[in-house]
Every structure is written in C-alpha cells, then in structure tokens.
Image (spheres, rainbow, N blue to C red):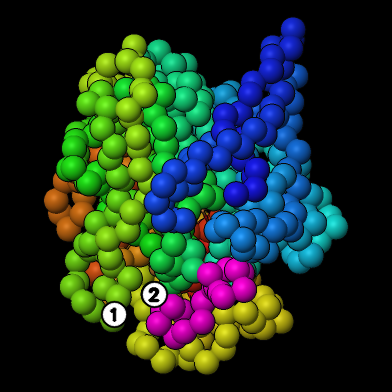
Amino acid sequence: MTNRYSRRAMLKTTGAGVALLTVPVFARRARAGTASSSNAFAVPPLDRGKRLGGRVTFALTLQRGESSFFPGTRTPTLGINAAYSGPVLRARRGDEVILRVKNEIGEESVIHWHGFRVPAAMDGGPHQAFADGKSSTSRFQIRQRGSTCWYHSHQHEQTGPQVYRGLAGMFIVDDDEIESLDLPARYGVDDIPVIIQDRDFNADGSFRYVRTMQERMLGKHGSTVLVNGVVSPILRAESTLLRLRLMNGSNARIYNLAFDDGREFQVVASDGGLLAQAATVRQLKLGPGERAEVVVDVADRKEVVLRSLRGATGGGGCRMGAMAFDRTLDIMTIDARDAETSAHRRPRQLIGPALLKPDDAAVTRSIRLSMGMMGGGMDRGMRGRGRRGGRMGGGAFTINGRTFDMNRVDFSARRDVPELWVVSNDSAMPHPFHVHNTQFQILDSDGRRVVAQEAGLKDTVLVNPQETVRLLMVFRDYSDPDLPYMYHCHNLEHEDQGMMGQFTVV
Ligand code: C2O
Ligand code: CU
Ligand code: CU
C-alpha cells in the first residue's frame, strides 16, 4: 500500500480556530491471510479547508497518479489532492464554501457536489465542464441539514470512467442538531467514513473498465471491493460503538449490507441527514450514490465481517443476467478485540427533518425509466470521447422515452413550489434515481409506506423493476432561467448512455 491516506488525519488548530489538515501516516498492519484480507483500514485525510470566519476555501487539484491496490502492482489512477480518490471535505451548515478545482488530469472534467442545494451555476454538472490546465470555482452557502454527502466527476458521457479511475470523495456537513445528540463523533476513531467501490483489474495492474455488452447494459461491476481505496480492509476498532458513514461510491453495484453474524445495527441518517428515530436493521440495501450513517455495537469484542449478501439487485429474479453480478462479497472486517468501552449509547431518538405533506405538492410529474433490449444500438465503445464520439448507447437508455441531450431542457420547476414526482421503472433491473439540488422524501413505493431507514431525506432512491415510487420535493432558494440541473440514474454507465434529463428552476 502506498500512503494515499493517513491512518488517522491529524487535526491542527490555530489560535483563530482554523483547522489545517493532513499528516499522512500510513501504518500498514498486515496480518496473516490472503493478500485481499490483510490490509489495514485507511481513513481518508480530512480537509476542513481554510476558514476565515464563516467562509471556507478548499483547494482541490484533480490529478493523475499511480496507486498500488495489491502488493507489487501499479494502477494508473485519478485523485483529488491524492493519487486515488480525494480527501473527506468537511464544513458546517451556514458556511459559505469556496471550492477551487484545478484540472490536471489531461482531459476535460468537472466536479459535482452530490446532495447539495446549490445555484445551478455552482452545481458542477456537465455544463460546467472545464479543460485540462484550467480551474473552476464553485461557491455557495450550505443551507441544508448536516449530512454525509459526496463529490465526484460529472463529465458528459465520461462520468463512469472518471469516477472509476478515482474522481470521487466524501463531503461531510456538520450542524448543531447532529452535535446535540449522543453519537460517536471522533473522526477516524469512532466516526468512520466507509467509501465502498468495486473494481476489476487487468493483468498489468490497470483498472479494467467496461469491456462487454453485458457490462454496458448492467453497468460496470467489479469483483474486488475497495473501502477508502483499500482492498477488503480490516478495521481495528478503537471503540465499542462505531458510527460508520457508508457511501456507495460504486459505478453500478448495489450492496445488500449485513454482518456475517447477523447482528443488528442502527441506521441514524440517510442521504439528507438524521432520521427521526434510529432504525434497527440486520440488512441495508445501498444503491450507487446512496449514503447511510449506521451505528454498530461491537462491545462483544468479536471479529465481524461486513458483507454484501446476494439479493442486492432486488425484484425481478434473473432477468437480463442482472443476477450475474449479484453475489456475496466481503466489504470489510471489524476487529474489536482491543476496543475501548464507548461512552456513547446505542441511539434511539434522533432529530428528523421538517417534512412536506402530499397535499403541499402543486405539480405532479411522471418520470419513466426504460432500457432498450440487449443489442439495441450498443455498437459504439464506452471509450468514445464525449461530444466527438457521440452517444454511446444509441438510445437504449431513456427517461420518458428520450435519451439525454445537453441542448434540451426537459421541464422547468418553480422555486419554492413543492412537487410530486412519480418515478416508475419499466425495465428489468433496478435504477438508483438521483435528483440534483434537493433532498426529497419518499412518499411510498407501489403504494406501500417506506421502511423506517428510508423515511428521512434522500437524494437518491433505488427504483426496482416494475416499481413506482412517489417522491415529494421542493427546490428552494435558487433560480436560473437558463442553466439546468440534472436528474438521472446513478448507475454511471446508464447515466453516460443517456438515462438523464435536465430541469431548470425558475
Ligand atoms: Cu452524484 Cu448527477 O450525480
Ligand atoms: Cu447530484
Ligand atoms: Cu439505471
């Protein structure tokens, strides 16, 4: 392992309360076992930016690098201030953040702030792309609840490959409500980012991206699981109560997370922040783009494996070969032998968001996610370069019958006017549906009330085959008559092939 990440980010506080960051100390704690099960857990460095009062400036460079995921191998990668992936950015509700992004990856790119309410010009969507050698700045006030969000490439038709190579990271928003609760909150000690990504490798060590028609249709699934850039790591728990900030940063894989001993754990937050009450579960499904904060009790001081169980692809059985990628995969091991007794208790009562009522919705929209059949215009390679290469999917991936077009705005929403979106999936595989610039509520799915862990705010929701979900949302604060936001499937291969639309807020 190279020292991409520090074992624990060191926090240095100046007199002005300015937090500067990152002292990389990568302690490799190899243990007996196979190469894929002996890696020390890595905590990404924390980046709190440079703070001047309520204004926080982040300097982010998109760069090329080389990483070693297995002993003796080298993988060309992309990263943000690192060889692979990026730091965990952190700011507070109310802060004005200034995110300066410099592009040094040798091709056009753009970074999107996933889960944030932002002016359209600051969203980091495909319209804000900028060339290699250039910089771009997103500036906005954080006006949403504390939550675990993220940031990643949103390059037109290249989001899949750029994220796969490493252009993604976590972005934590803090607020008073969260801090008023008795939740584990020591970064890297008992409050731990867990960015889950799956990858395949070529014999020469390079990442193997989409090769086959099946991968184009189902999205890129890999057989190696990385957590914070490390292959199936072991976390030496330092505390008996752990808060894990789970983030599915994978291109296409849906995880059905559970511990190997079947133990219960508590979900305390979803994409948009705290739930009203902790939801106790034994399994948690997480589609690409989704996050969940969970609290795990390891006071029995055992070694437990967090894994993804079969059945993650949900509904629909063996259609379209979707099950080809639906397998049991070990994510990470938690070794709690040396854990110190936590001062925190298992969470119960939390602080839920203010919710809209269905009657508040002044507008209803129907959104239909569809896939063409295998072979429908799938002749062009995924490596086709953006605008020059033209559309890759040939019309196979649609929303309301249309593939994405940069020059077509699909509709306009009114600022501050609640909307009801009826999202249906008439294809044979699940789609993680994501909307920019908002955190929505899932009203119901096929008429059934949602489970407790999905009763909070979300920005991405898995829509199973033949399922219809109803979402309540509102776009607050910002309007722009010209620049659109995106809504799309967060299976990045589907997105790149056109399962995306655009809306403006006026
Ligand atoms: Cu996380 Cu439009 O994306
Ligand atoms: Cu987004
Ligand atoms: Cu999809």
Q: Quadrant of residue 301?
A: top left
Tag 2: amino acid: Leu
Tag 1: amino acid: Gly
Residue plotted at (65% across, 56% down)? 67
Q: Quadrant of residue 246?
A: top left
| Image: 281 above or below 351 | below
Residue 80 horizontal side relative to residue 468, left or right: right
What is the residue that sits farthest to the left in this orientation? Answer: 448
**SS class of the residue under badge 2?**
helix
Which residue does the numbered mark 1 point to in the structure image?
Answer: 321
Q: Range of the magenta residues?
A: 201-217
Examine the residues drawn in magenta and state their main secondary structure: loop
Question: Where residue 477 sits in the image (x, y, percent)?
Answer: 55, 36
- Asked whether the residues under the numbered discs 1 and 2 touch, taking CB atoms below 8 Å apart as contact, a structural biologist would say yes
Q: Is residue 251 magenta?
A: no
Which residue does the numbered mark 2 point to in the structure image?
Answer: 218
Residue plotted at (37% across, 79% down)? 371
Determine which of the numbered discs, if any, sits on residue 330 in the image: none
Q: Nearer the viewer, residue 461 or 70?
A: 70
Q: Nearer the viewer, residue 69 or 486?
A: 69
Residue 388 horizontal side relative to residue 30, left or right: right
Question: Where residue 350 sits in the image (x, y, percent)?
Answer: 29, 22
